[in-house]
Image (cartoon, grey):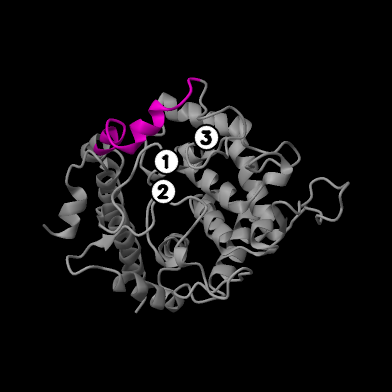
């Protein structure tokens, strides 16, 4: 069986693969009957129903509140994974989860960004993941999401935000979260965090160009400059614990939480229109080097045992990783990278 046929076959364990293959590899519109049937299948079997079956009727998972912990079954992760798996944003249970996040997982005014708890818990990996999920699930234009996106953008550029040292200022950066402009984060010992940058650009790139505010446009420019300041193939962005990049960059998997990989960096940059940039060539070659003789890619990074449902088998051919790789390589080829 050729690779595309493999991705398009009905698969009760991973029905989202067929849905995304139809839309992203074959360019089928959302009105196509096969696409609609494929998304209906996402809601009937596989990991999405397992996640939704664990949801409280009030919209949260595990416990009420901001919903960051426990990883990776709580509210913010469940909503994030539902979007990544192709869940139907119009489903009442999915909408309840999204609404709960918008009402309970944001820092209060004058901040508004997604947070693990209060202004001190705002980190760009979380903000980017949640904003991307909510955009995919149909919440573009919701004032609460607009506010969260505006904060995310300005947290990158620093516009209108006081330094963390100005303890009486509001809004300001916090030393416990994103602590300064330019993707600086406490989790990275107050160095710029490339994982956070990838997640932030993942979200901002999903906003239609015509709807991007000036703040969003400035943030995207800053993010692209940062991600292309190093070779995406080597991913040697600022690091403080190790002398070499995390192996997570080079172990492709699905879904992705706050960790990222070279493939997602390419997904982000191609979505922003940089598929033809020659600086992506070595990273594209890296992706191709991981393709097996049968045209498939292996699952190398997994949250199995930590989510509400396991997804594929580590070390085995992965429909999800193969879908991701083909999607990126298709975009790079279309935009003309040599």
Q: Residue at x 57, y 52 (%)?
A: 125
Report the residue that reaches farthest toward the top.
Answer: 57
Q: In this view, does 302 lie to the left or right of 298?
A: right
Look at the numbered disc 2 and give the secondary structure of its residue. loop
Distance Cα–Cα, label 3 vs label 2 = 16 Å
Q: Residue 274's spot in the image, x, y percent?
A: 45, 68
Look at the numbered disc 1 and give the secondary structure of its residue. loop
Q: Write the start and end of the magenta stretch as one range.
A: 38-57
- Residue 44 visible, this orientation: yes
Q: Which residue is drawn at 55% across and 66% down?
A: 224
Which numbered disc, 1 or 3, marks the residue closer to the eye? 1
Q: Which residue is drawn at 49% across and 26% down?
A: 96
Residue placed under numbered mark 1 in the picture: 307
Look at the numbered disc 3 and give the secondary structure of its residue. helix
Asked if labels 2 and 1 touch by Cβ distance under 8 angstroms, the answer is: yes
Q: In this view, does 316 lie above or below 118?
A: below
- Residue 90 visible, this orientation: no
Residue 109 is covered by the magenta coloring: no
The picture quadrant where one finds residue 311 is top left
Residue placed under numbered mark 2 in the picture: 303
């Amino acid at each position: 069986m050729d690779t595309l046929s493999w991705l398009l076959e009905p698969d009760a364990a991973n029905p989202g693969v067929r849905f995304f293959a139809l839309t992203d590899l074959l360019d089928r519109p959302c009105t196509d009957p096969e696409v609609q049937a494929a998304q209906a299948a996402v809601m009937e079997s596989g990991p999405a129903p397992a996640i939704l079956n664990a949801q409280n009727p009030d919209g949260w998972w595990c416990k009420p509140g901001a919903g960051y912990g426990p990883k990776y079954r709580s509210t913010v992760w469940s909503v994030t994974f539902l979007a990544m798996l192709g869940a139907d944003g119009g489903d009442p249970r999915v909408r309840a989860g999204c609404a709960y996040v918008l009402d309970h997982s944001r820092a209060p005014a004058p901040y508004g960004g997604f947070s693990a708890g209060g202004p001190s818990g705002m980190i760009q990996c979380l903000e980017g993941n949640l904003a991307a999920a909510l955009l995919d699930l149909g919440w573009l234009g919701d004032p609460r999401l607009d506010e969260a996106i505006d904060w995310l953008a300005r947290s990158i550029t620093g516009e209108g935000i006081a330094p963390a040292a100005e303890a009486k200022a509001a809004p300001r950066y916090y030393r416990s979260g994103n602590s300064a402009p330019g993707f600086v984060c406490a989790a990275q010992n107050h160095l710029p965090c490339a994982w956070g940058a990838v997640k932030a650009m993942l979200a901002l790139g999903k906003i239609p160009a015509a709807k991007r505010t000036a703040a969003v446009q400035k943030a995207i420019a800053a993010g692209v400059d940062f991600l292309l300041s190093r070779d995406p193939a080597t991913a040697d962005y600022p690091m403080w614990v190790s002398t070499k990049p995390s192996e997570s960059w080079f172990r492709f998997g699905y879904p992705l939480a706050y960790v990222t990989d070279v493939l997602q960096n390419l997904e982000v940059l191609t979505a922003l229109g940089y598929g033809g940039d020659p600086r992506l060539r070595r990273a594209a070659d890296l992706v191709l080097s991981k393709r097996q003789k049968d045209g498939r890619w292996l699952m190398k990074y997994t949250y199995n045992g930590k989510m509400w449902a396991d997804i594929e088998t580590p070390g085995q051919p992965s429909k999800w990783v193969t879908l991701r790789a083909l999607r990126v390589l298709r975009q790079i080829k279309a935009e003309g990278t040599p």
